[in-house]
Image (cartoon, rainbow, N blue to C red):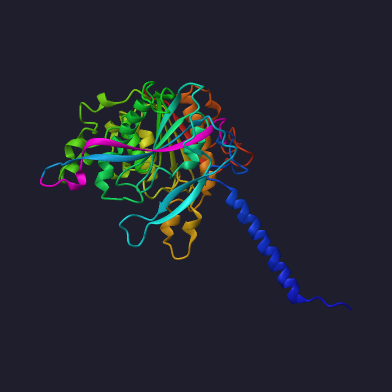
């Protein structure tokens, strides 16, 4: 009789297990933020354009330095912003990856020190743009507090591949590396978005001398914001802030006159509405539960808007937060995509591997991850619906079959979704009152 060596079997099983783990890890490493999962909906796939990316630093001169205001005096400073610009490129990607340098942690927080890390994207750094097709619609992207211009690369790359110039802002005083007192974000967010739009419009002028000259259609602009970015884009598009918010600034040193210029009660505010903006995407917009808007302010939004929310959002609120904004912007066509049981993180990239390191605060992981949903699934669904929405309002493509989904529609698969993959969500649609 031949005896079996139990130790040898154990070793063989361990080798097999480790081999499987290595295979799975290898497969995971090949996944780049924004790639499609097997059940990704139809419009989440990348477009036909190869992608270039560049970094640009711009300066908005003579802005109120609210962090150094005192005794009723508002010093001025030149406010520097870093922009990341994705665009259709002449060169071919051939699935080449790029490394983005990012930080985790929060400046000034001893419990969450700044930790550098890199992650991959699919673009070519400083590639020449594709100037043979004509001008592309412009998209301005605004991150949350705190965040960065790299927080939603799954979306920025995806949209650029579909024929958009996509510009993500590093909002000074709001990023991982320079987080500062919150009043700077409250005051500057909408101003930064509008300044970035104007700066890109200037670069797109045929005689600007920039490589993007002649290929930016700023008259056909969409603005996209997450959390505090949502707070900003809604104001830029016409939802004037409440007197309660301006009252918050009046109790501080400086800034009250500047924020009052963005209030619905200011007669001059509505005259500042930018006709170039044709579409708004607000992902988990912050502010409604804090009295940032009232009914009259929300009525000022008259630009088609796509809202994205988690039904358990514990930062922006849902019923009395995001859904209340959706219900209150009665003078525009709007949509509300809700991820059932999701919290606030319905917009970022997936959590980086570095966030799983032992000893790190779980908040680094929950900066990106959702407690109920696979973030990659959320990314794919966002790509799908935002593609349909922007394609409708900026390119005139008929994507109505994807956007007009009946309420309580989970009895059958949603258009564009794989069988059995469209559960756990709700998409509401409302027409403008006038």
| Residue 248: image location, x then y, percent | 20, 44
Residue at 36% x, 39% y is: 230
Name which quarter of the figure residue 331 lies in.
top left
| Residue 89: image location, x then y, percent | 51, 31
Residue 369 visible, this angle? no
Name which quarter of the figure residue 55 lies in.
top left
What are the residue bounds of the magenta stretch?
A: 45-71
| Residue 273: image location, x then y, percent | 30, 26
Image position of 6 with respect to 233: above or below: below
Residue at 39% x, 21% y is: 206
Q: Is residue 185 magenta?
A: no
Residue at 31% x, 50% y is: 178
Q: Quadrant of the C terminus?
A: top left
- Nearest the eye: 156 or 319: 156
Q: Quadrant of the N terminus?
A: bottom right
Residue 101 visible, this angle? yes
Q: Is residue 56 magenta?
A: yes
């Amino acid at each position: 009789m031949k005896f079996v060596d139990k130790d040898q079997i154990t070793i063989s099983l361990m080798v097999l297990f480790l081999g499987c783990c290595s295979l799975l890890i290898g497969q995971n490493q090949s996944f780049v933020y924004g790639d499609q999962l097997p059940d990704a909906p139809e419009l989440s796939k990348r477009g036909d354009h190869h992608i270039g990316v560049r970094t640009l630093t711009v300066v908005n001169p003579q802005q109120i330095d609210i962090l150094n205001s005192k005794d009723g005096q508002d010093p001025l400073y030149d406010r520097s912003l870093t922009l990341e610009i994705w665009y259709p490129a002449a060169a071919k990607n051939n699935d080449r990856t790029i490394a983005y340098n990012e930080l985790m942690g929060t400046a000034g927080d001893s419990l969450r020190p700044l930790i550098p890390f890199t992650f991959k994207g699919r673009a070519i750094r400083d590639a020449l743009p594709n100037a043979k097709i004509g001008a592309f619609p412009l998209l301005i992207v605004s991150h949350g507090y705190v965040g960065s211009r790299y927080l939603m690369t799954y979306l920025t790359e995806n949209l650029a591949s579909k024929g958009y110039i996509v510009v993500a802002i590093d909002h000074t005083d709001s990023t991982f590396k320079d987080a500062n007192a919150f009043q700077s974000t409250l005051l500057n967010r909408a101003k930064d978005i509008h300044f970035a739009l104007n700066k890109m419009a200037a670069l797109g002028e045929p005689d600007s001398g920039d490589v993007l000259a002649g290929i930016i259609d700023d008259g056909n602009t969409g603005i996209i914001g997450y959390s505090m970015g949502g707070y900003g884009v809604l104001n830029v598009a016409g939802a004037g802030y409440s007197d309660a918010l301006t009252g918050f600034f009046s109790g501080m040193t400086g800034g009250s006159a500047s924020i009052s210029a963005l209030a619905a009660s200011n007669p001059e505010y509505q005259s500042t509405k930018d006709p170039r903006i044709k579409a708004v995407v607000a992902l988990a917009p912050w502010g409604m539960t804090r009295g940032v808007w009232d009914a009259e302010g929300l009525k000022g939004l008259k630009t088609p808007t796509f809202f994205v929310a988690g039904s358990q959002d514990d930062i922006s609120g849902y019923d009395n937060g995001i859904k209340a904004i959706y219900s209150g912007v009665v003078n525009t066509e709007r949509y509300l995509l809700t991820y059932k049981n999701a919290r606030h993180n319905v917009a970022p990239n997936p959590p980086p591997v570095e966030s799983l390191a032992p000893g790190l605060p779980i908040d680094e992981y929950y900066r990106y991850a959702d407690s109920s949903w696979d973030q990659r699934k959320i990314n794919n669904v966002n790509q799908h619906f935002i593609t349909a929405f922007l394609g409708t309002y900026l390119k005139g493509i008929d994507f109505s079959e994807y956007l007009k989904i009946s309420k309580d529609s989970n009895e059958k698969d949603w258009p564009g979704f794989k069988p059995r993959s469209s559960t756990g969500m709700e998409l509401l649609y409302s027409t403008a009152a006038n």
